[in-house]
Every structure is written in structure tokens, then in C-alpha cells.
Image (cartoon, rainbow, N blue to C red):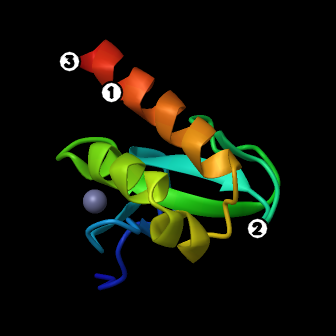
Amino acid sequence: MSRRRSSAEGPLRTCVQCGAVAEKRRLLRIAGRPGSAWALDPAGRLPGRGIYLCREGGCVERFASRIRTRKGGARWKMGDGGMDLADRLAAMTADEA
Ligand SMILES: [Zn+2]
């Protein structure tokens, strides 16, 4: 009997907000390039760097409040796009509430 686990699980990613590790497809991806536009990427297909967040547990809300601040936005080099992204994240979580 093999001890190796099935590779049916997808690649793992870390939530930038709480540090939880989960399958990539179970996390919400935000795609973008530092210094330019960032966009929600629920399907995980957009090019660029990825930021991953738990879909549940308040990580999306907390991340949105973080990037509204100058310091939080600077952490990911979001520039003015951080506000826009925060608004979209807030709208998304409001829909689910
Ligand atoms: Zn999280």
C-alpha cells in the first residue's frame, strides 16, 4: 500500500490576511501587478501576481479595510487602485450577507 496521498487536491495557497493554507480553488484570488490595476479573479485565471483570501471568516472584509489605508495599500503597492478594489470587495461581501 502506498503512503502517498492522492494528488486530487489542487495547489495550496496561503491567505494573506490570516495565514491559513487552503486549496487554491477554495480561496478568493485577486490578480494584478504591483503599481497598476488589481482585479477580483474568482476563476483564478487572470495573469499577474495573486493575492489569496479565505472566502469565509471575515478575511475579505478585514483585507478590504486594510487596503483602504495608505499603509495597507502600500503593502501591495496598490496605489489609488486599492480604494477601488476595497469597494468591490465590500460590495461582494455585502451581496453574500
Ligand atoms: Zn484567511
Percent position of residue 73, x then y:
55, 63
Q: Residues within 10 Å of mark 2 (few under 14, many from 20)?
A: some
Asked whether 88 or 9 is in front, the reply is 88
Looking at mark 1, is its residue's CB closer than 8 Å to ligand 1? Answer: no
Disc on res. 57: none
Disc on res. 34: 2
Disc on res. 97: 3
Alpha carbon separation for disc pair 2 and 1: 24 Å
User: Residue 91 vs residue 80: left or right?
Assistant: left
Q: Is residue 12 visible?
A: no
CB atoms of marks 2 and 1 within 8 Å: no
Q: Is residue 75 above or below residue 90?
A: below
The image quarter containing residue 21 is bottom left
Amino acid found under the numbered disc labelled 3: Ala
User: Residue 72 vs residue 31: left or right?
Assistant: left
Quadrant of image for the N terminus: bottom left
Amino acid found under the numbered disc labelled 1: Thr
Percent position of residue 85, x then y:
58, 40
Looking at mark 2, is its residue's CB closer than 8 Å to ligand 1? Answer: no
CB atoms of marks 1 and 3 within 8 Å: yes
- Residue found at the far top of this picture: 95
SS class of the residue under badge 1?
helix
Alpha carbon separation for disc pair 2 and 3: 30 Å
SS class of the residue under badge 2?
loop
Q: Is residue 20 above or below residue 2?
A: above
- Image depth: mark 2 or mark 3 in front: 2
Alpha carbon separation for disc pair 1 and 3: 6 Å
SS class of the residue under badge 3?
loop
Quadrant of image for the C terminus: top left
